[in-house]
Amino acid sequence: MRRLVIELYGKELENLKGQSSYRNIKSAELVQLLRHDQDEIVGIWRIALNDPGSNVEDCFKDDGVTIEASVLEREADGGEASLVFRRAKPQPGFFLGRGTSKPGGAYMVGFLFKDGRLRFTMVGTQKQVKEILDRAEGSGLKYRVVSLEDADFGTHAPINRLTSKQRRILTLAYELGYFEVPKKITANELAARLDLTDSTVVEHLGKAKKRLLGEILDKA
């Protein structure tokens, strides 16, 4: 299984502010996922409003997505943030949502909306994660890959000899077709997705390949 953390940003996210469920939300974080299937997503959220005096439940009324939303408690930091129980319909129209709206698809296990950026944590097979990245690439939205890890690697697997940054860059390069002939993505494009410079990406790819080859050949 793969674990992907992807962050969306840019002017395109301004469209969220036109939706009633985001109009007055300063930040929203999924604290605990309780249920996630083709029918609904149920979880506990930490919600902070631009206007703390507003009613949290009102933010989700008539948005066409929320089935139920109720405040569990206000936190002790002046009452700005609330813990909210929310049941909502999956959103297959959103490029990350198609895989989460059916059994066997990649699952969203983390969500954070803050400072105009939207961060998702998804878990799925290599094929499912690749589909998410392909949809992100074709959506026209600006995004960066925060992390991409394989939970199936054993403690003695060669890839665990890499640093976290080397593993992140190498894994994404593989997922997006950097090593295919012809390449499906250039080092420049890969660097943009990782929010790194071209030279940093090339340097870490070189070090990762050298270290992996060393591990493999030493055991041959």
Image: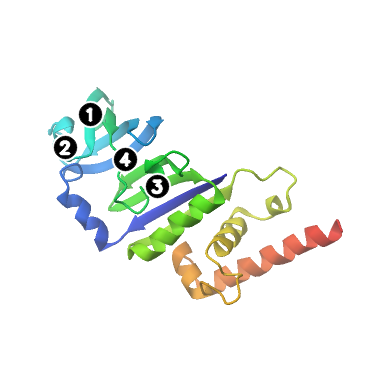
N-terminal of the pair, mark 2 or mark 4, is 2
N-terminal of the pair, mark 1 or mark 2, is 2
Identify residue for label 3: 120
N-terminal of the pair, mark 4 or mark 1, is 1
Please name the amino acid that badge 1 sits on: Ala
Identify residue for label 1: 69
Toward the bottom, the furthest residue is 182
Quick check: marks 1 and 2 in contact, CB under 8 Å?
yes
Q: How many marks?
A: 4
Identify residue for label 4: 90
Q: Residues within 10 Å of mark 4 (few under 14, many from 20)?
A: many
Please name the amino acid that badge 2 sits on: Cys
Identify residue for label 2: 59
Report if residue 80 is visible in the image.
no
Q: 154 left or right of 114? A: right
What distance separates the C-alpha of mark 4 from that of mark 3? 14 Å
What distance separates the C-alpha of mark 1 from that of mark 3? 21 Å
At mark 1, the secondary structure is strand
Quick check: marks 4 and 3 in contact, CB under 8 Å?
no
Toward the top, the furthest residue is 72
Expressed as whole percent of the image width and height from the top left, the position of residue 106 reads 46, 44
Expressed as whole percent of the image width and height from the top left, the position of residue 20 reads 15, 43
N-terminal of the pair, mark 4 or mark 3, is 4
